Amino acid sequence: MDVEIIELSDDNARFVLTGVNPAIANGLRKSMLSEVPTMAIDYINIYDNTSVLFDEQIGLRMGLIPIITDLDSYVLSEDCDCNDEGCTKCQLTLTLSAEGPVMVYSGDIQSSDPNVSVADEKVPIVELKERQKLVLEAVAKLGTGRKHVKYQAGVACGYKNVPVITFQDTCDACGKCVDECPKEILRIDGDKVTVTDPLKCILCRLCVDACDIKAISLEEDDSSFIFTAESDGSYPAKELIVQSADTIIEKAKLLNEILESIE
Amino acid sequence: MDLKVIEKTDTEILVEIGGESHTLLNTLKSSLLDDPRVEVATYDIKHPTISEPILFVKTAGVDPVVAIKEASARLIEVYEEFKSVFSEKASI
């Protein structure tokens, strides 16, 4: 197994994973999308809302605001010692109070835990005009993407197989494929055509169709994957990927423990 | 996770793995099929929102529970390897 990082920033990662079967890669993708726990606002008490939006719309907007997740300090409410009654280990209280005229952003939400705050301060909630008020208290909990989309940590996670472009000896370097390629990754090199960056290939097959003598073959490598992962801000992209592998490991360990006990 | 053994013989097992989804079952199935002693490994989720996955494993002699345990251990190994390789490359 090998990993080659193409791009890694706080909320974006692109890497090539080689030497695994498709099920392992798919497990990783699914885990990022639906199994990694993140924090999101789960219910709100509205004390005052004279804005133009209904309480329900404010609730929806609050729920979808990404919150930085700290898995060391918080646990899933169903795993908590308090039996889902709500305590400081499984819940985080946030408050928001604003009076017009002002544009209310996610950055105005005050968190009761100094280590946990909203991931993006510029998510618009509502615009308040003169004499309009919004006062509310929100409770955030951990959850997984399987339960609700607001808990989804990875927002654009996917992979494709690494393309393998090969030219037969019959290739006469006519250049038709070079003109056709939308990504411009083919180049005439003397009397043959070479691929400059196969990772940029979008598998459109225009080069294969353009070749009159069928000298190009485009295949997909079944054991190499170009992964793209984008985080919603709850985790840095790197941590999201490690966490997704961790989540499957935990599941597999739990399965083994249970099997041990039924034997 | 909530395991219910529906049927078990010396070489076959039909077990419901409650609370899990394709994420674990699909990877586990592929890991089971890597084992040459496993003849059949498959799972089914009858209804995507209301059903629990049911895993069926048939082996050529070995206890199916042992086969599942070993497959799951292999899965842990693969993802641990991924974690270490990825963390190493990402920290440079």
Image (cartoon, coloured by chain):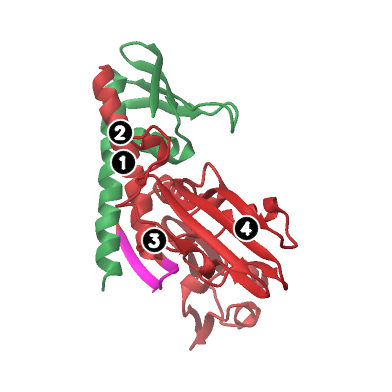
Q: Which residue is drawn at 37% across and 16% down?
A: B12
> Where's residue A38, x and y in %?
44, 52
Residue A157 makes an appearance in the image: no
In the rendered structure, which disc, 3 or 2, sits on the residue that comes first in sequence?
3
Are the residues tagged 1 and 2 within 8 Å (C-beta)? yes
Provide the residue designation for mark 3.
Answer: A116
Provide the residue designation for mark 2.
Answer: A254
> Where's residue A159, x and y in %?
49, 58
Gap between marks 3 and 2, in whole Å?
A: 29 Å
Provide the residue designation for mark 1.
Answer: A250
Which numbered disc covers residue A112?
A: none
Q: What element carries label 1?
A: helix
Q: Which chain is green in the rendering?
A: B
Gap between marks 1 and 4, in whole Å?
A: 32 Å
- Frontmost of labels 3 and 2 is 3
Gap between marks 3 and 4, in whole Å?
A: 19 Å
In the rendered structure, which disc, 1 or 4, sits on the residue that comes first in sequence?
4
Q: For chain A, what colour was chosen?
A: red
Q: Mark 4: few, some, or many residues within 10 Å (few <14, many ≥20)?
A: some
Q: Identify the chain of the residue marked 4, using the numbered disc in the image.
A: A
In the rendered structure, which disc, 3 or 4, sits on the residue that comes first in sequence?
4
Gap between marks 1 and 2, in whole Å?
A: 6 Å
Which numbered disc covers residue A61?
A: 4
> Where's residue A194, x and y in %?
48, 79
Region in magenta: A2-14
